[in-house]
Image (tube, grey):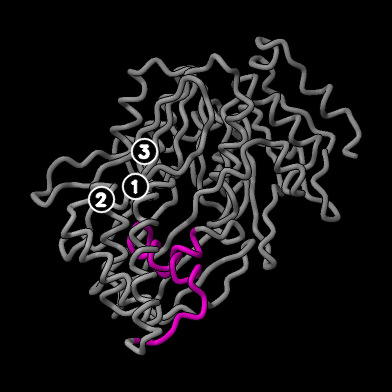
């Protein structure tokens, strides 16, 4: 931000305080105030009262961003090619375009970073301070904010903004982008319609949440979907949907709402399908119990491969307490989970589905049996020739997966 823009911004803020208006809720008024202050500044600068402005339109945008948006970060939030923004320090601001990180020329101050975070948290009702040095929150546009402060970080505030995007709303769009083959997309669409329980796995940034949303776009229109997440991320265009997120404890340490609590509450809301944004800990047990009751569901999980995802899902429920053991968990995973979809991101930032497993429902020793229905071969996601063995749900829905799997991958 130039000195001229900073001066104009301060004059607008002074006028806002005097007039007692809220520019954040009135974009037209914010633009009018900014242009009024800019016009006044230009007249003064021509008389030698300050430095001239080379680009008045750019200056106006910067002033408005400082007043109603998120200041120097707003251009990155407005740029559709940027998918994530993170700050390691005030002078180390990075963005990711199509999965590839780059260091920007943006330089802030420590106070500016704190002001931006406070502004971002205003609409969420969440806080970050010494007693609560981590925060996850949603921005007004649905983007996810994560902040960590010292002394958890060594010196500077660490800020991550994962942008919300509406570009990838269905499986067809993923096919167009090369993330998924048409044959695999048709198979997954059939799995959703047959109420298969689907586990989406992969490393961070691999597109798990995006794939979950795309899968849900194939659900029947009359379905009632209930979603539970740590922080709102899923973007689902459904007629009958309830979305819930966790709540942090208050300053007094009370009022926390955990993911386990949300899953239990969701079961009382007459869902036709339960979606858990991500399972990390003991809430996996509550999810398995819900799926074991016959409720269709989906969730995501961090894992290096589809089989690792199954192994992890067999382990996480053990965190729920001593009375939970693998003798219950492993057969339950085998019986409840039907499909595992593995996502990956390569060094060039390309995201794609690399494997789709179908569980047989059986256990061999302590290992859940599953066979790959699709695998990545020569850079293409191709059918392997294997078919799902659990067919009861497909038949109940009047669907036959062998029809799709018998087609040419081309």
Q: Could you say whether the residue bearing mark 1 is in a helix, strand or loop?
A: loop
Q: Could you say whether the residue bearing mark 2 is in a helix, strand or loop?
A: loop
The reply to whether dot 2 and dot 1 touch (C-beta < 8 Å) is yes
Residue, x 29% and y 80% (percent of image)? 155
What stretch of residues is rendered in magenta? 50-77
Q: Is 49 in the magenta? A: no
Residue 76 visible, this angle: yes
**On the image, which quarter does residue 410 sit in?**
top right
Residue, x 64% and y 26% (percent of image)? 218
With 329 as the anchor, is 201 left or right in this view?
A: right
Q: Which mark is residue 283?
A: 3
Quadrant assignment for the N terminus: bottom left
Q: Residue furthest left?
A: 252
Q: Position of residue 255 (x, y in %)?
A: 16, 40
Q: Position of residue 273 (x, y in %)?
A: 49, 22
Q: Is 66 in the magenta? A: yes
Q: Is residue 366 above or below residue 270?
A: below
The reply to whether dot 1 and dot 3 touch (C-beta < 8 Å) is no
The residue pinned by badge 1 equals 26
Q: Position of residue 104 (x, y in %)?
A: 52, 77
Q: Is residue 14 above or below residue 283?
A: below
């Amino acid at each position: 931000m130039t000195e001229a823009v900073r001066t104009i911004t301060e004059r607008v803020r002074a006028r806002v305080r005097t007039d007692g208006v809220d520019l954040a809720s009135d974009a037209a008024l914010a633009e009018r105030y900014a242009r009024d202050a800019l016009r006044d500044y230009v007249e003064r600068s021509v008389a030698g009262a300050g430095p001239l402005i080379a680009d008045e339109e750019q200056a106006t945008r910067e002033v408005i961003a400082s007043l109603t948006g998120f200041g120097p970060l707003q251009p990155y939030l407005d740029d559709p090619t940027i998918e994530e923004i993170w700050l390691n320090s005030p002078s180390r601001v990075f963005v990711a375009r199509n999965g590839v990180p780059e260091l920007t020329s943006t330089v802030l101050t420590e106070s500016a970073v704190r002001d931006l975070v406070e502004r971002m948290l205003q609409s969420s009702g969440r806080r970050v301070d010494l007693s609560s040095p981590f925060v996850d929150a949603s921005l007004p546009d649905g983007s996810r904010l994560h902040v960590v402060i010292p002394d958890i970080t060594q010196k500077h505030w660490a800020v991550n903004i994962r942008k919300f995007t509406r570009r990838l709303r269905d499986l067809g769009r993923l096919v167009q982008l090369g993330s998924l083959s048409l044959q695999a997309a048709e198979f997954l669409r059939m799995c959703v319609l047959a109420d298969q329980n689907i586990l989406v796995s992969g490393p961070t940034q691999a597109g798990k949440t995006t794939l979950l949303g795309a899968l849900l776009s194939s659900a029947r229109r009359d379905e009632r979907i209930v979603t539970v997440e740590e922080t709102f991320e899923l973007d689902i265009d459904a007629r009958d949907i309830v979305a819930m997120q966790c709540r942090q404890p208050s300053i007094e340490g009370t009022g926390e709402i955990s993911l386990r609590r949300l899953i239990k509450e969701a079961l009382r809301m007459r869902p036709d399908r339960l979606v858990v944004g991500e399972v990390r800990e003991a809430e996996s047990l509550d999810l398995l119990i819900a799926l074991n009751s016959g409720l269709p569901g989906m969730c995501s999980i961090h894992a290096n491969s589809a089989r690792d995802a199954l192994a992890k899902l067999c382990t996480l429920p053990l965190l729920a307490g001593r009375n939970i053991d693998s003798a219950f968990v492993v057969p339950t995973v085998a019986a409840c989970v039907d499909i595992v979809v593995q996502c990956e991101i390569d060094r060039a930032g390309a995201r794609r589905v690399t494997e789709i497993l179908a569980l047989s429902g059986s256990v061999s020793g302590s290992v859940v049996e599953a066979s790959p229905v699709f695998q990545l071969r020569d850079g293409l996601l191709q059918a392997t020739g294997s078919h799902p063995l659990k067919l009861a749900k497909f038949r109940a829905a009047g669907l036959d997966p062998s029809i799709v799997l018998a087609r040419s991958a081309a």
